[in-house]
Amino acid sequence: GDLVTTGGRVLAVTGLGDSHREAVETAYGSIAQVEFKGVRFRNDIGRGR
């Protein structure tokens, strides 16, 4: 079957690493693999350090 959503937050991605930087890079690398129509994500989370 297909996965169907009508909007809102549909996915959470977590990155793990030996440092904060590595964890952020892992998370955003995983996000780059997510594909669906209308996909949007914040690119500021975890980058404030």
Image: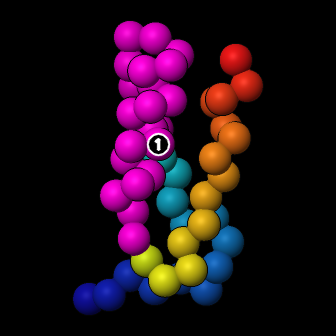
Q: Verify whether residue 20 appears in magenta.
A: yes
Residue 32 x/y as whole percent? 41, 54
Which residue lies at the image location 64% right of the left edge and 79% below the top edge?
A: 7
Residue 15 seen in render? no
Q: Residue at x 64, y 30 (%)?
A: 46
> Residue 40: x percent and y percent?
60, 66
Residue at the limit of the structure toward the top, as seen here: 18
Q: Is residue 40 left or right of residue 13?
A: right
Q: Position of residue 4 (x, y in %)?
A: 46, 86
Q: Nearer the viewer, residue 28 or 7?
A: 28
Q: Which residues are magenta?
A: 14-35
Where does residue 19 sit, x and y in percent of width and height? 46, 11
| 10 relative to 42 in the view: left or right | left
Q: Amino acid at mark 1?
A: Tyr
- For the point 50% across and 19% down, the residue is 21
Question: Where does label 1 land, which residue?
Answer: 28
- Locate the N terminus by quadrant: bottom left
Residue 25's place in the image compared with 37, above or below, is above
Q: Residues within 10 Å of mark 1 (few under 14, many from 20)?
A: some
Q: Secondary structure at mark 1?
A: helix
Q: Is residue 27 magenta?
A: yes
